[in-house]
Image: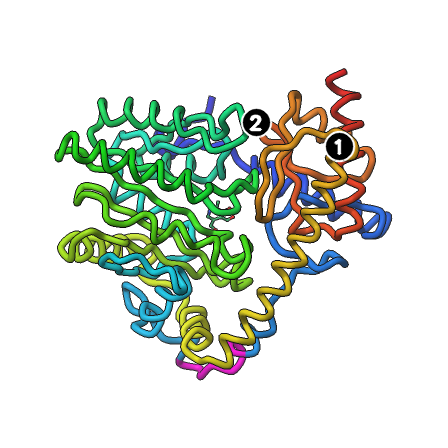
């Protein structure tokens, strides 16, 4: 056997991203028989009904008219001052928590998750995430010498599994004294679940009780809000931000903000990690650690993307146009998801509790075999460990209506 040149912990399998593999097959099939005959529900990006990527006019009309220096110049390690001023509104809108808020620019939400794991979980520690989760959490933890551990996301009655969450949290507090937990809500990837305000109240009560029990505990919650602008109506999806305040000083709430979906800036790599800290000192510490992390990883982010977001948020007319366009697509997504949910009900297809967002999950066994069976019907879907992931963000309402019947038939064929 050939000697490895990479270090032991960096040995990786090549080209094993199943989502990109299946989406490649979908594209090939579209080239063969035309897009009308193919359902490509693999990708996590907003597509119009013809399968073209949506890029908001209200964003790119601003982006295209920047000064050359806005594209060319470094953005500064922590982000441009204009971006840092305006990303707070983009994150919280009018539901800004009564806390010490700081922001550090990152390349997308991925960068924000990275910094949270790097700076708030100890080397070798386990980060708490749900069993249904965005796979890169594990990748980022691994890449940084941390691990992930899971709890069951759903209770028997289809709500957030508070008991399971608290039990897992208790276990980690006992072992590590410091726990970083990531909750992706609202519009969770891959299920579309959003915690209710009552569930957030229960989480807050638990954190408060634990933090008071032992002042040495460090409780850090990272709210991954990558899909928040596609959730709820008006600002209802942000109610929880005001709930998660007023806890003891050994509880810290962080927010991973992403401009990828909400601003259709996927490839521009724009986002931020924000803290809603209980004290000024904890906020200062956050800003210093995360700026250092920027310097030590990607140095700084995409200047033109930061300037675009800052211009849109700080100008009443631009912001109104942008919010109207975002609203239009949120309604399109919600109509597509409803078509899928209604059809699922009609054919008796079991799905995970869905509230909002880019994805709907269907729990089932032998997921890869079911996915392969659906491929024979020119229907491309993602196979996860615990089920299938369907992407209404990428599929027309008409195809969303057709999909549940096909999925149900494929599950029955494979699983009997
Ligand atoms: C749950 C979740 N968190 C964070 C992200 C971060 O995305 P990006 O780095 O493109 O902003 C994504 C993107 O797919 C996601 O699904």
Helix, strand or loop at disc 1? helix
**Eyeballing the image, is 224 above or below 66?**
above
Q: Is residue 266 in view from this perspective?
A: no
Count the marks: 2
The residue lying at 85 percent from left, 47 percent from top is 37
Q: Position of residue 316 (x, y in %)?
A: 46, 80
Residue 407: assigned label: 1
**Eyeballing the image, is 137 above or below 169?**
below
Mark 1 or 2: the one toward you = 1
The residues tagged by marks 1 and 2 sit, at their Cα atoms, a distance apart of: 16 Å
Q: Position of residue 242 (x, y in %)?
A: 34, 53
Estimate how packed mark 2 is, as few (under 14), some (14 to 19) or many (20 or more) residues with alpha carbons within 10 Å.
few
Residue assigned mark 2 = 385
Magenta residues span 62-69
Badge 2 residue CB within 8 Å of ligand 1: no
Q: Position of residue 350 (x, y in %)?
A: 67, 29
**Eyeballing the image, is 20 above or below 59?**
above
Q: Nearer the viewer, residue 188 or 301?
A: 188
Q: Is residue 222 left or right of residue 23?
A: left
Q: Is residue 331 left or right of residue 86?
A: right
Q: Nearer the viewer, residue 372 or 408?
A: 408
The residue lying at 34 percent from left, 49 percent from top is 243
């Amino acid at each position: 056997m050939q000697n490895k040149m990479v270090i032991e912990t960096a040995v990786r399998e090549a080209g094993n991203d199943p989502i990109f593999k299946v989406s490649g097959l979908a594209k090939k099939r579209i080239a063969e028989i035309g897009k009308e005959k193919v359902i490509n529900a693999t990708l996590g990006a907003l597509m119009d009904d013809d399968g073209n990527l949506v890029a908001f006019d209200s964003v790119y009309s601003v982006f295209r008219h920047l000064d050359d220096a806005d594209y060319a110049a470094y953005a500064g390690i922590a982000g441009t001052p204009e971006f840092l001023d305006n990303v707070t509104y983009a994150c919280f809108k009018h539901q800004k928590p009564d806390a010490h808020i700081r922001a550090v620019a990152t390349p997308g939400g991925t960068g924000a998750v990275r910094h949270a794991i790097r700076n708030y979980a100890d080397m070798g520690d386990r980060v708490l995430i749900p069993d249904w989760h965005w796979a890169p959490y594990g990748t980022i933890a691994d890449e940084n010498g941390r691990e992930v551990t899971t709890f069951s996301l759903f209770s028997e009655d289809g709500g957030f599994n508070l008991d399971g969450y608290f039990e897992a949290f208790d276990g980690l507090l006992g072992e590590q004294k410091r726990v970083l937990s990531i909750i992706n809500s609202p519009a969770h990837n891959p299920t579309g679940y959003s915690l209710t305000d009552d569930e957030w109240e229960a989480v807050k009560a638990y954190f408060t009780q634990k933090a008071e029990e032992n002042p040495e505990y460090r409780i850090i919650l990272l709210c991954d809000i990558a899909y928040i602008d596609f959730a709820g109506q008006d600002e209802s999806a942000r109610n929880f931000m005001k709930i998660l305040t007023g806890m003891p000083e050994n509880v810290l709430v962080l927010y991973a903000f992403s401009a990828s979906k909400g601003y259709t800036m996927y490839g521009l790599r724009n986002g931020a990690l924000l803290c809603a800290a209980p004290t000024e000192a904890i906020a200062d510490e956050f800003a210093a650690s995360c700026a250092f992390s920027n310097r030590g990883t990607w140095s700084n982010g995409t200047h033109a993307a930061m300037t675009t977001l800052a211009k849109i948020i700080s100008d009443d007319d631009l912001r109104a146009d942008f919010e109207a366009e975002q609203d239009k697509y949120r309604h399109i997504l919600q109509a597509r998801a409803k078509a899928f949910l209604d059809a699922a009900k009609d054919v008796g297809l079991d799905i995970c509790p869905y509230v909002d967002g880019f994805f709907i999950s269907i729990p089932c066994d032998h997921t890869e075999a079911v996915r392969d069976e659906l491929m024979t019907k020119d229907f491309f879907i993602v196979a996860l460990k615990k089920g299938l992931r369907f992407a209404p963000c990428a599929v027309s309402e008409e195809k969303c209506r057709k999909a549940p019947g096909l999925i149900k038939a494929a599950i029955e064929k494979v699983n009997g």
